[in-house]
Amino acid sequence: MTVKVKYSVIVPMYNEEEVIDHTYGRLKEVMDSAGEPYELIFVNDGSRDGTVAKTSLIAGADPNVRLIDFSRNFGHQIAISAGMDYAQGDAIVVIDADLQDPPEVILQMIAKWKEGYEVVYGRRLKRKGETLFKKLTALAFYRLLRSMTNVEIPLDTGDFRLIDRKVCDVLRSLKEKNRFVRGLISWIGFRQTSVEYVREERFAGETKYPLKKMIGFALDGITSFSYKPLKIATYLGFFLSLGSFFYLLIILYQRLFTSTTIEGWTTIVGLNLLFNGIILLLLGVIGEYIGRIYDESKNRPLYIVRETLGYAEQAAKAEAGRAEEQKLAGRDGR
Ligand code: UDP
Ligand code: MG
C-alpha cells in the first residue's frame, strides 16, 4: 500500500522561475523535518516564463512533488482552490511561491493543528521590503473589509495558513466563482488560531499583484461578503433627495417672495455634473454585483488543467506497492 499523505503544501505560481528552485529546496527541507509523508503541490497559474519547465524537472525527480498546470492564468485564489481539489493530506498548507512567508513557520502551524485547531493562519507582524504604497493599501483594505462585513476576517492575514481536511472539504463544496479564499475560511468557522511571523522580502522577481489585480481582489473580497455598498447607495440617494427637496423649497420661496434673482448657469451645471457623477458611480456599484451574479450563473468550471504531473508516478508506485503486498500475502497463505 502507498503511504497515506499527511500534509499537502499548495504553492500557487505565476511567473516564478526565479524563485522556484529555492522555494522547493526550503519547503523540502522543512517538510522532511516534519517527519510524516507529505506532498508539495505546485499549481502553475498560466506562467509565461520557465516556471513549468523547472517545476516539471523537480516533479520528475521527487515523488513527493506534483504539478497542476493551468491552461492559462486564472488567478491566485483559483490556483489555491485547485490545489485544494487535488490535495490528499489530512492537513493542507497554502504558501506563496516567493518565500515571503517563511516555510519554517509551517512547523509551528502543524504543532497548533496537532493541539486540535482546524485552521491556523499566519499573521503578519511586519512586512519587510514592500513599498509604502502596498503597506498602506493593505492596511486600509483589511480595515475597510472588516467594517464592511459581518464575517470575522482577521486583520493582516494572507492566504498563508494551514487548514484541516474537514475545512478543506467544506471549502471545496462552496462553488462560488469569485473566490476570496481567506474570507471563505473565516466564514466556515471551526476552531481557528494564529501564529505570528514577519513577512520577508520577496526572494526574487517582482510582485504578481499589480494595482489592477489588487483592486479586483479587494472588490471580490467586499462584494463576496457584504452588500453594504448597495445600502450606502440607498442612504446616499435618500439624503441627496431630501437635501434637494429642501433646496427646492428655498429657491421657490426666493422666487415668489423676494426680489433676489438666482444666478442660474453655474449652479445648474455644477449640480448636474455632481448628480450625474453620483448616479454613474452607484450604477457602477450595482454593476459590480450584477457582474458577479452573471459569473456565477454561467456555471463554467473554475479552472482548466492542461496536465498534471506526479500523480501517474504516484499511482504506479501504489500499484507496485500492492503487487508487493499480494506477493507477501500469497507467501503467507501457502
Ligand atoms: N500568483 C498566482 N496567480 C496570479 C498572481 C499571483 O498564482 O495571477 C501567485 C504568485 O506566484 C505568488 C502568490 O500568488 O506565489 C502571491 O503573489 P505575489 O507574491 O506576487 O503577491 P504579493 O506578495 O506581492 O501580494
Ligand atoms: Mg509575494
Image (cartoon, grey):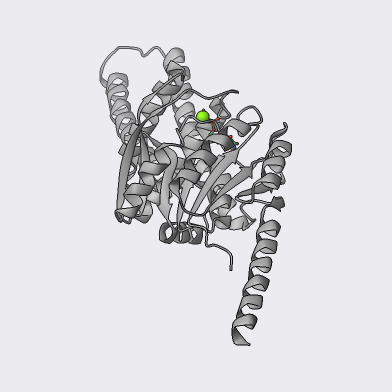
When the figure is inspected, residue 131 is found, relative to residue 123, above or below; the finding is above
Quadrant of the frame with the C terminus: bottom right
Does residue 85 appear to the left or right of 60 in the view shown? left
Observer-nearest residue: 31 or 17? 31
Kindly identify the residue that appears in the image at 71 percent across and 46 percent down: 60
When the figure is inspected, residue 4 is found, relative to residue 186, above or below; the finding is below
Observer-nearest residue: 240 or 5? 5
Disc count in the image? Answer: 0
Quadrant of the frame with the N terminus: bottom right
Kindly identify the residue that appears in the image at 52 percent across and 24 percent down: 202
x, y percent for residue 137: 42, 25
Kindly identify the residue that appears in the image at 58 percent across and 29 percent down: 208
When the figure is inspected, residue 250 is found, relative to residue 157, above or below; the finding is above
Residue 212 appearing in the image: yes
Quadrant location, ligand no. 1 = top right
x, y percent for residue 53: 74, 38
Observer-nearest residue: 14 or 35? 35
Does residue 252 appear to the left or right of 32 in the view shown? left
When the figure is inspected, residue 247 is found, relative to residue 315, above or below; the finding is above
x, y percent for residue 146: 32, 38
Kindly identify the residue that appears in the image at 69 percent across and 57 percent down: 313
Furthest residue in direction bottom, as rendered:
334
Residue 186 appearing in the image: no
Observer-nearest residue: 126 or 293? 126
